[in-house]
Image (tube, helix red, strand yellow):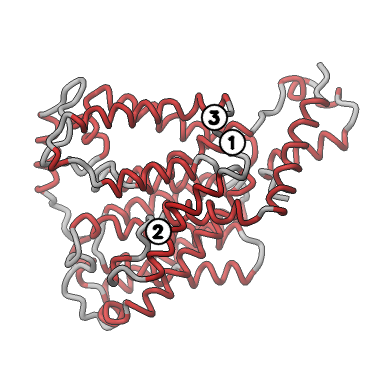
Amino acid sequence: MNLEPRMDKLHGAAVLERQFMQRQRILFILPLFATAMLLSFGRNGFLPFSSYTPLDQMINVLIVIAAPLCLLFRPVNFFRHSFLIRILPLIILWIYVAFCVSGSPKTYWPDHSAVLSIFLAILLASQVSVSQLRMLRLLTLVAGLLFSAFVLLYGRRELSSILGGTLNQRLGSEISDSLLVAYPRMLYVIAFTCFVSAIAEKRVWLKIGAIMLAILPVLVALATGGRGPLVALSCAVLFFLLGLRQRHSSILGLLLAASIFCIGYYIVSEYLPVMAQRIGEWDDAGRSILYEKAWAKISFFGRGIGDMYAHNIFLEFLQDYGIFGLVLFLITTIISVGSAARVYWHTRNVDVLWVMGLITLQLVAQMFSLNIYWAMVWGTLALPLGFAPEIVPLPKEYEESPHSWRDRKRKDHWLKYLREGYDK
């Protein structure tokens, strides 16, 4: 079998994409930054510390208008057969969710802003290729940098309360209960991205900058008293460390994680009594009651949205959308996780492992709180659906007889692009 045309096609596609990105950077950077915001803070920006600011308005306009328009002038995945197959279960799932919601009382319908955010998150995240993952991670760091600047400008009162150890209530409780639970998860996405960047980046200034950038988001997240997102962050860090193939990077990450844990424990015990009290509350009878009520309302096709949600994404699907809805969600999740795992197996790209860590963080956090109408969850699940189809596995002929390829230099060049995700 002549494998040279296949290699030429793969290599040529990577070169053309990289050349197009260099000529039309704005068409890629704007959607990527919008995706980074949707995976972390959402399209409303950094609202929890103040009223709607000009920066929040700019972010909203970027995500809703500018980023989708950029997709009209750049290559997209919409018409790729493999992409349509992968994303079909997700489309069927949301059509079924919409059908169930339409039969529920209108007072329980999700806000139109949340639905629009989910649509935009899936749209933008599914167009990210492997070669753009590092840029997406760096732009997530930029979002964290903007958040830190925003806190220093508009949240000095709350920040002084945290640093002074005088915070006598959970940060964010005066705004809304849902935000109180969602906000720490947003910040832990930034913190996890900083952790990965401190390990993955080769430049020393980027490593140090990522570590410094994680301090303020972690501090504010701990002040919210959220326990579920903290467990989710721990699981994501552990998953990432176990998935690393480089031994020295794993050791470095383990030391960094241990240092962060020790420093965080000291800060919580000395300056954040709210979080220390929350960690000590092991008996959570209220959530157990909700689980029992949700389990008692299980049906095959669901009953639609009601006045209670189960604080667990799997039980919520069983309660509101039935066994059929849960099966659709599990199929979507398995395809997403399986696609990411397959790409990482063939590329060893650390940014693919970062995406898998984000999926771990979101799924674990969803087992403790929030309903399904949050864009960061679905945008994260949609990421592997977009970049997985472009990865071509090693051909069977090469595995059986690698020396049968006549052009050794061209084969090595192809494998380099395949394993590094076309980044270099």
Q: Is residue 174 visible?
A: yes
Q: Are marks 2 and 3 in contact (CB under 8 Å)?
A: no
Decide if residue 252 is in sight here: no
Badge 2 element: helix
Amino acid of disc 2: Asn
Q: Nearer the viewer, residue 162 or 145?
A: 145
Q: Callout 3, which amino acid?
A: Phe
Q: Which mark is residue 161?
A: none
Residue found at x 48% / y 51%:
35
- Classify residue 49 by image quadrant: bottom left
- Is residue 77 toward the left or the right of residue 111 in the image? right
Q: Secondary structure at mark 3?
A: helix
The residue that appears at 23% across and 66% down in the rendered structure is: 172
Tell me how far mark 2 sits from mark 3, CA to CA.
Answer: 28 Å
- Measure the C-alpha gap from mark 1 to mark 2: 32 Å
* Residue type marked 1: Val
Identify which residue, 214 or 66, lies in the foreground: 66
Q: Which residue is mark 2?
A: 60
* Residue 343 badge: 1
Which numbered disc, 1 or 2, marks the residue that appears first in the sequence?
2
Residue 15 % position (x, y): 76, 43
Q: Is residue 261 left or right of residue 340?
A: left
Q: Position of residue 177 (x, y in %)?
A: 18, 57
SS of the residue under disc 1: helix
Q: Which quadrant would the N terminus be assigned to in this image?
A: top right
In the picture as drawn, the residue positioned furthest to the right comes out as 406
Which residue is denoted by mark 3 in the rendering?
83
In this view, the mark in front (1 or 3): 3
